[in-house]
């Protein structure tokens, strides 16, 4: 069921990105995804997904991603104006054992480095500050 929702999210994201053909290159439309980070704050929740094939090919926890990977970010705001924003992201490993998340659609936003061990981070204005992320989940 969750894979079907993720596939639907990618179709919606791809359709919304037709006006941005340069950013749409490499977006997966029919690929099973796995949640690798779940982050929770007072104002919102953030989840980061990567294709299952990336996790099946290597132990990302010890070896890193190995290359830049296209994934998915879901930001769900809390409160009276509950809203869920789904957007494609680019992920890459850093030398200090973190995963950097770069958004395609919001070019002015700074990349966010999420440590593999999880921790407390400051996301953008939609997700709020002092968001706590769980450790990276390989499966």
Image (spheres, rainbow, N blue to C red):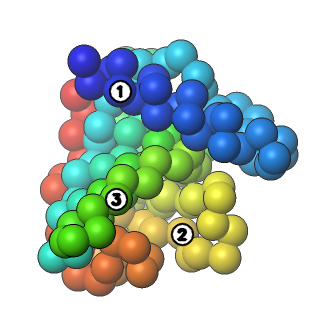
Residue named by callout 2: 111
Taking the image as shown, residue 4 lies to the left or right of residue 86, namely: left
Residue named by callout 1: 5
Observer-nearest residue: 113 or 75? 75
Q: Report the mark closest to the observer, 3 or 2.
A: 3
Disc with the residue nearer the chain's start (2 vs 1) = 1
Q: What SS does tag 2 mark?
A: loop
Q: How many marks?
A: 3
Q: How busy is the neighbourhood of tag 2: few (under 14 within 10 Å), some, or many (20 plus)?
A: some
Disc with the residue nearer the chain's start (3 vs 1) = 1
Q: Which mark is residue 83?
A: 3
Which residue is painted at 16% across and 76% down in the image?
A: 42
Q: CA distance from mark 3 to mark 2?
A: 22 Å
Taking the image as shown, residue 128 lies to the left or right of residue 95, namely: left
Q: CA distance from mark 2 to mark 1?
A: 26 Å
Q: What SS does tag 1 mark?
A: helix
Which residue is painted at 58% across and 22% down in the image?
A: 29
């Amino acid at each position: 069921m969750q894979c079907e929702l993720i596939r639907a999210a990618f179709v919606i994201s791809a359709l919304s990105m037709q006006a941005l053909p340069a950013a749409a290159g490499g977006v997966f439309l029919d690929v099973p995804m796995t949640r690798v980070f779940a982050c929770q704050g007072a104002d919102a929740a953030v989840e980061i997904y990567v294709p299952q094939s990336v996790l099946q090919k290597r132990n990302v926890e010890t070896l890193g991603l190995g290359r830049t990977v296209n994934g998915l970010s879901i930001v769900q705001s809390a409160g009276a104006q509950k809203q869920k924003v789904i957007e494609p992201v680019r992920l890459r490993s850093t030398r200090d054992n973190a995963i950097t998340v770069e958004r395609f659609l919001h070019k002015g936003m700074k990349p966010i480095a999420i440590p593999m061990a999880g921790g407390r981070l400051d996301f953008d204005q939609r997700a709020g500050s002092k968001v706590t992320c769980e450790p990276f989940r390989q499966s």
